[in-house]
């Protein structure tokens, strides 16, 4: 059985990853499963997301707590298993921990897996975060210098320069160009 393709978007909270994935769901020819970090976080009991135990998931907003670390490991292994079973998978992620990058590089290096960087200037991220109202204030700032650190991408988009539709179309065009994924292999070899 042939492996499915993974398209992983990495960027800070409010960068526009989920909006881009919503468009990709509509425009990609093959069916893709959406296995993003928020979907995995929302598997937790509410007290971990909006209550006193949030620090066990992310504490502060730029570091994973023990529950967040276990959840990320499960997510990474789940995405790899889905792709190995032949499913195509769209993933939105926030690489807060260097270990997450290393783990994904190890799990995905032998699977057709593209790593796409989703960038946006901090001032715009903070404005979006405030407008959303469903994020803790300061998450974008806390994540900003961590999320793209020491990561090489197959392709990047800037959501301040283009809307989700345009970014998704650019990603689709890149994928259609026949470019082989190599970011995870390069990260594994680094």
Image (cartoon, rainbow, N blue to C red):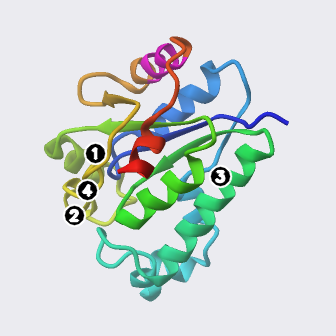
Query: Marks 2 and 4: in contact by CB < 8 Å?
Result: yes
Distance between the alpha carbons at the discs numbered 3 and 1: 28 Å
Name the mark on residue 140. Answer: 4
User: In the image, which residues are magenta?
Assistant: 168-175
Q: Residues within 10 Å of mark 1 (few under 14, many from 20)?
A: some
Query: Marks 3 and 4: in contact by CB < 8 Å?
Result: no
Labels 3 and 1: the sequence-earlier one: 3
Name the mark on residue 79. Answer: 3
Q: Is residue 173 one of those drawn in magenta? A: yes
Circle 2 sits on which residue?
A: 142
Distance between the alpha carbons at the discs numbered 1 and 2: 15 Å
Q: Is residue 67 above or below residue 103?
A: below
Q: Is residue 95 left or right of residue 70?
A: left
Q: Nearer the viewer, residue 107 or 117?
A: 107
Query: Marks 3 and 2: in contact by CB < 8 Å?
Result: no
Q: Which part of the image, by quadrant, shows the N terminus?
A: top right
For marks 3 and 1, give the one nearer the viewer: 3
Distance between the alpha carbons at the discs numbered 2 and 3: 26 Å
Q: Farthest left residue?
A: 123
Identity of the residue drawn at 53% across and 83% down:
47
């Amino acid at each position: 059985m042939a492996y499915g393709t993974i398209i992983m978007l990495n960027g800070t909270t409010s960068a526009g990853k989920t909006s881009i994935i919503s468009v990709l769901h509509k425009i990609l020819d093959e069916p893709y499963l959406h296995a993003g970090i928020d979907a995995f976080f929302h598997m937790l009991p509410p007290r971990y997301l909006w209550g006193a135990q949030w620090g066990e998931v992310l504490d502060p907003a730029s570091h994973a707590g023990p529950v967040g670390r276990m959840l990320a490991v499960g997510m990474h292994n789940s995405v790899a298993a889905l792709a190995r079973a032949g499913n195509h998978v769209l993933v939105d992620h926030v690489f807060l921990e260097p270990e997450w990058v290393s783990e994904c590089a190890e799990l995905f290096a032998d699977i057709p897996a593209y790593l796409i960087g989703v960038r946006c200037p901090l001032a715009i991220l903070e404005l979006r975060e405030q407008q959303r109202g469903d994020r803790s204030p300061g998450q974008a700032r806390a994540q900003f210098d961590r999320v793209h650190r020491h990561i090489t991408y197959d392709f990047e988009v800037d959501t301040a320069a283009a809307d989700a539709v345009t970014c998704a179309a650019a990603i689709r065009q890149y994928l259609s160009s026949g470019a082989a994924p190599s970011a995870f292999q390069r990260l594994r070899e680094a």
